[in-house]
């Protein structure tokens, strides 16, 4: 395979630390559906570590959520599980819509890579961040970013 992820625990990016979790090889390569020479063979977990200011904002603004919902919001907002070819697809073609365990959510990408502040993300979704992250995307949802 020629790629070694074990010695990369995190990346410093845009003033923050984006951490790598487990990186696993898959059973062979997956080729891009766009016939564009992109292929991938690894499943990558990465996340943004706990941020005191972000936790305070979520607790204050989403106090209506119960413990399980708050844990779900926090996890969905701070963790991405994706294949190694997804970043190339995002760069070239945009985002895949929907909430599944293996798609890179554009909201989460914005938060983890500090492309937009949590305050900015919250404002874009007018207090409905939990609903936005747990329900299916529409073209209107994506246009808010």
Image (cartoon, helix red, strand yellow):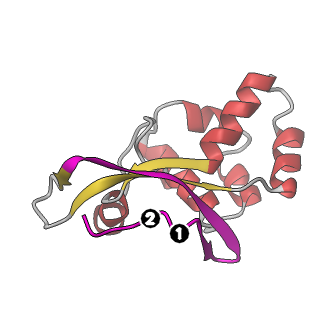
Q: 86 above or below 64?
A: below
Q: Residue at x 73, y 32 (%)?
A: 71
In terms of image quadrants, where is residue 139?
top left
Q: Residue at x 51, y 69 (%)?
A: 7
Answer whether residue 145 is visible to the viewer in this image: no
Residue 16 highlighted magenta (yes or no): yes
Q: 106 above or below 8?
A: above
The foreground one among 83 and 56 is: 83
Mark drawn on residue 58: none
Label 1 neighbour load within 10 Å: few <14, some 14-19, many 20+: few
Element under disc 1:
loop
Residue 115 in percent (x, y) is at 61, 68
Q: What is the span of residues highlighted in magenta in the rendered image?
A: 1-28
- Secondary structure, magenta segment, majority class: strand
Q: Residue at x 46, y 32 (%)?
A: 136
In terms of image quadrants, where is residue 97?
top left
Label 2 neighbour load within 10 Å: few <14, some 14-19, many 20+: few
Mark drawn on residue 5: 2
Q: Residue at x 51, y 45 (%)?
A: 141
Residue at mark 1: 8
Instruction: Report the number of discs.
Output: 2
Quarter of the figure that contains the C terminus:
bottom right
Quarter of the figure that contains the N terminus:
bottom left
Element under disc 2:
loop
Q: Along the horizontal axis of the image, is 40 left or right of 57?
A: left
Q: Are marks 1 and 2 in contact (CB under 8 Å)?
A: yes
The foreground one among 128 and 8 is: 8
Residue 129 in percent (x, y) is at 67, 41
The foreground one among 123 and 101 is: 101
Q: 4 above or below 12?
A: above
């Amino acid at each position: 395979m020629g790629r070694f992820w074990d010695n990369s625990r995190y990346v410093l990016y845009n003033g923050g630390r984006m951490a790598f979790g487990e990186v696993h090889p898959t059973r062979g390569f997956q080729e891009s559906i766009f016939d564009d020479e992109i292929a991938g063979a690894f499943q990558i977990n990465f996340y943004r570590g706990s941020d005191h200011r972000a936790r305070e904002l979520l607790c204050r603004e989403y106090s209506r959520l119960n413990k399980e919902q708050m844990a779900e919001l926090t996890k969905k907002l701070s963790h991405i599980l994706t294949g190694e070819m997804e970043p190339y697809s995002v760069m070239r073609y945009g985002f895949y819509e929907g909430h599944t365990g293996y798609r890179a959510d554009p909201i989460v990408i914005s938060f983890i890579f500090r492309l937009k502040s949590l305050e900015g993300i919250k404002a874009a979704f007018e207090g409905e961040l939990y609903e936005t992250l747990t329900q299916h995307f529409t073209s209107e949802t994506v246009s808010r970013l």
